[in-house]
Image (cartoon, rainbow, N blue to C red):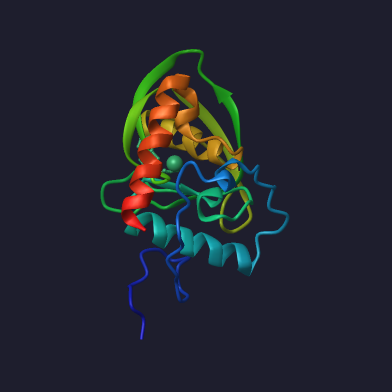
Amino acid sequence: MPSIPARHAIIDQAMALLDILHYPDPRLHKVAKPVEVVDERIRKLVADMAETMYKAPGVGLAATQVNVHERVIVIDTSDAHGQLRVLINPEIIWASEEKKVWEEGCLSVPDYYDNVERPDRIRVRALGVDGEPYEFDADGLLAVCVQHEMDHLLGKVFVQYLSPIKQTRVRTKMKKHQRETV
Ligand code: GNR
Ligand code: NI
């Protein structure tokens, strides 16, 4: 008896919600390793990450955030949850010199939003869930999201772009939040 209908052709197995790590958890700063083979284990991880992202809800999720330290990202910046993108071993192969400021949030930093400046447009190469390489151009929220997720794979959380005083404030706020929700 399937509890949640499959949203995408690749999600045809029992799914599971994963726990999301919260800043300042030190495990968010681990560097993810490349995926060597896109096998059943990775496809299951992708399905579970997609379910976790949609449930949150969020527009992206990196494996690091669910304490899996391999280079896997899911993204869906569409309105209707119909365009799941899977990025395995992603690389940014081109970035515009033009930068743009965007107000970012993060499922690992609940209820905190702040401005981050990043390249405005990028070209990305990654493996899909079928293990085949593909490329795409991104701008707007998608470009922001790809860069934000790729930072997670390098152990970087967006608050690390903020001033030291703001980072201290965010850590204090998160620790307080943690005490109140345990
Ligand atoms: O859901 C998310 N929204 C978002 C908004 C602006 C910039 C980046 C993001 S990513 C975030 C989900 C998340 O934490 N991914 O790591
Ligand atoms: Ni995030």
Q: Name the residue at 36% across, 86% down.
A: 1
Location of the C terminus by quadrant is bottom left
Query: Which of the four quarters of the rendered structure image does ligand 1 lie in?
Result: top left
Which of these two is toward me, 141 or 181? 181
Q: Looking at the image, which residue sits at the far bottom?
A: 1
Q: Looking at the image, which residue sits at the far right?
A: 36
State the image quarter where residue 112 is shown: top left
Lateral position of residue 24 relative to residue 82, left or right: right
Q: Name the residue at 64% across, 51% down.
A: 70
Q: How many marks?
A: 0
Let me know if residue 117 appears in the view: no
Q: Name the residue at 34% across, 27% down.
A: 114
State the image quarter where residue 28 is shown: top right
- Expressed as whole percent of the image width and height from the top left, the position of residue 11 reads 45, 68
- Expressed as whole percent of the image width and height from the top left, the position of residue 160 reads 50, 28
Lateral position of residue 98 relative to residue 41, left or right: left
- Expressed as whole percent of the image width and height from the top left, the position of residue 61 reads 46, 48
Let me know if residue 28 appears in the view: yes
In the depicted structure, whether residue 53 falls above or below residue 145 = below
Which of these two is toward me, 27 or 107? 27
Lateral position of residue 47 relative to residue 4, left or right: right
Q: Name the residue at 62% across, 67% down.
A: 41
Q: Looking at the image, which residue sits at the far top?
A: 97
In the depicted structure, whether residue 182 falls above or below residue 115 = below
Lateral position of residue 162 relative to residue 91, left or right: left
- Expressed as whole percent of the image width and height from the top left, the position of residue 35 reads 68, 53
